[in-house]
Amino acid sequence: MVFPMSKKTQCLGNEEWFARLTGTREALSKTLYAMYSGLTGGITVDPALMMIPADDHLPQRGDGVFESLKCLNGQLYNAAAHFDRLELSCRGIGMELPCRPAELSEIVCATIRAGGQRDCLIRVLISRGTENMGIDPALCKGPVLYVIVYRYTARIENGKLKPARVALSTVPIKPPQYATIKTCNYLPNVLMKIEANRRGLDFVISVDENGNLGEGATENIGILTPENELLMPTPKYVLSGTTARRALELAKKLVTDGTLKTAEYRDICPAQAAQAKEIFIFGTTTDVTPVVEWEGIPVGSGKPGIIAEKLLSLLKTDMTPESETLTEVFK
């Protein structure tokens, strides 16, 4: 529900303002579970209160960085890798983390517990700060940490990850200095998703200035060559995805047992993708998603391949309670 614009816009009192916010956002309680704000130093579970101020440089200028994490069965996956990248992103735009990684982990876990859902996604945002409607970041009071816990919906079809239809994007790729930092300026990524929707595709993949494959709107891509090489685009022009990087590390086991010839970063041109035995999409919510159609042409047999199955199995094993990549939240 959104209130219509009126010729006689009223100045509302606090009670009426809050009542209207509650009315427009109460249905979101099944989507938004909890939010931590560094401005209060506490957590709310009321969607009507899950707000970032109008004077914050994050919504004003896109001036901030973020990470998206996954919690499954009460266990936070690969948090250390996400926090390391978050710190690098902060430094990339001239900021510092507002707290130590250990404290950040405690805040994230506390926010998950407050939301009460063992399966969820977590968005960690760090803004330059508040109290500034202008462009000069030196005038911001911050940085400010926000943590939002929300519903996790997997791409499931018939009990398995839904295969994807993918093609090249016409949206220009970000320059390397922006592509390799996870900033809150995601307009090109949004335009890529609009393009995918318009073309009836699941994902589109950018092309870098040298004509090689880049990345998806929020995903990484990999291919299996006819020589059984698992390749991913070099991180020079794309964000180094935590799931893709972890999958590449785990794939070394398949190199050791002879299933794969190699597993590495390398420039990949579109012609190589067209000839690939298998193509994969990697991401926090997509895990290892097999691509069954590339540029309107079936990939391999047009069905998910064996390497996609093996990579997904390795990732799932990496998410079991015995794994060192998990952080127990509800302990």
Image (cartoon, rainbow, N blue to C red):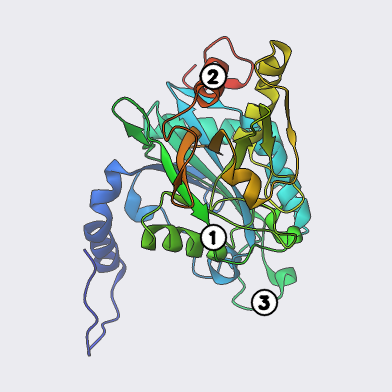
Q: Is residue 112 left or right of residue 178?
A: left
Residue at (38, 54) in percent of width and height: 49
Q: Amino acid at mark 1?
A: Ser
Instruction: Give how far across and how far down residue 102 sits, in percent.
Output: 68, 30
Of the numbered discs 1 and 2, the one sitting upstream in the chain is 1
Report whether residue 121 is seen. yes
Q: How many C-alpha atoms fall within 10 Å of the one at disc 1: few (<14), some, or many (≥20)?
A: many
Instruction: Give how far across and how far down residue 164 sits, in percent.
Output: 42, 41
Q: Nearer the viewer, mark 3 or mark 2?
A: 2
Residue, disc 2: 310
The image shows residue 100, relative to residue 178, as above or below, that is above
Marks 1 and 3 close (CB-CB < 8 Å): no
Report whether residue 286 is seen. no
Front in this rendered view, residue 80 or 135: 80
Spatial CA span between label 3 and label 2:
49 Å
Q: Amino acid at mark 2?
A: Lys
Disc 1, SS: loop
